[in-house]
Amino acid sequence: MPTATLPSEMDALVLTGPGAFELRKVPVPEPGPMEILCRVHSIAIDTGTDSKMIAGVFRDAWGWPPYYPITIGHEWAGEVIAPGDGVFDFQPGDRICAASHKGCGHCRNCAIGRYTLCLNYGNEDRGHKQYGHCSAGAYSEYFSISVKSVYPIPGSLSYDEASLVDPAGIALHSAKRAKVGPGDTVVIFGPGGIGLLSLQCAAAMGAGRVIVVGRGERLKKAAEFGAETVIETAGKPESCKQAVGVVMKGGRICYAGVTLGDVPLPLGEITLNEIDVYGLRANPNTCPEAIALIVKGKIDLKSLITHTFPLTEFATGLETAVERIDGAIRVIIHP
Ligand SMILES: [Zn+2]
């Protein structure tokens, strides 16, 4: 590994406890076997998980983050610096984007391609990682990641856009889970980042009507993407129940947001109307497909990027994203 040109230390965002974080100098990691050391160029603040993990609200339910101090962050893109032992498909200088899941590779679910449901979830000794969740993440200048979790990106895609391939892949997985087909009517609750990407994926898969339910500036963005819009202010968990109310008999519902606690659903209607209910976990194998749709212009990531900040101004970036300051949709950090 060509360490001569690499600094020994780098800037990293370090969570020190619930609601507490600071910028620290930490050692630049070395890539292990089947890992790639990358320079992180762009990393997006995921308000669905990052901001809640920073606040500590996912610790009890999901173990995210599992310990302190830790660096998190998982929606990113960058450049290959040094492939580790056993990596043949990537060279220094290659441009890549990343996904958060690395399956163990040998459990039943990994074997059939459902590696986001790895049966060894959270067990690094058995080869599993979910970067920026139960394992350390990428809010840093350099990051070492499994070759299983990176994808090459074309030159036409900027690093800022490529940092959003991960959520685009999740949105595509949601449209595929719900079996969106030609002419279907699709209703999306919540015009956040995943909602706005899901509407584009539904359209890309041939949906006839796409209706987005929500409020605020983001609903205008949904209209710009060609969706019909309906205003409502209930938010979760009420919208989980409303979905059962609006779906047609025999229809399909996909729950994409990570919720906490018990959410009551009208099981009688689900049963008697033969409604298919799908859960959703990340983006198994859909990032390459999402990249193809982005290149074709079927998914517009540029319009979702409203703000960029250097890593040194992470706190301002986080506040901008969480408080939706100046119509913020996706805020990108540059380490
Ligand atoms: Zn597995």
Image: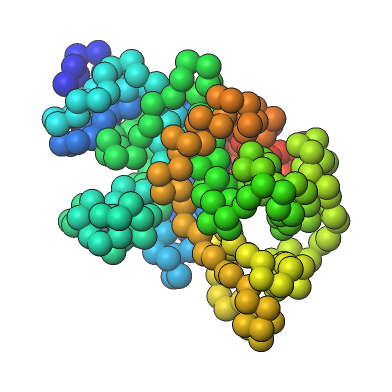
Residue 240 position in % (x across, y down): 67, 69
Q: Can residue 322 be seen by looking at this rendering?
A: no
**Color theme of the render:** rainbow
In this picture, is 59 found above or below 99?
below
* Side of 145 where 325 appears, left or right: right
Residue placed at 14% from the left, 31% from the top?
Answer: 86
Residue situated furthest bottom in the rendering: 268
Q: Quadrant of residue 148?
A: top left
Residue 29 position in % (x across, y down): 25, 33
In this picture, is 239 found above or below 3?
below
Residue placed at 79% from the left, 38% from the top?
Answer: 226
Residue placed at 64% from the left, 39% from the top?
Answer: 204
Ligand 1: image quarter: bottom left
In this picture, is 205 found above or below 87?
below
Residue 155 position in % (x across, y down): 47, 15
Camera-side residue of 205 and 100 = 205
Instruction: Please give the count of numbered marks on the rendered protein.
Output: 0
Q: Can residue 225 be seen by looking at this rendering?
A: yes
Residue 260 position in % (x across, y down): 55, 70
Residue situated furthest top in the rendering: 5
Camera-side residue of 87 and 267 = 267
Residue placed at 71% from the left, 72% from the top?
Answer: 249
Q: Quadrant of the N terminus?
A: top left
Camera-side residue of 31 and 263 = 263
In this picture, is 266 found above or below 246?
below
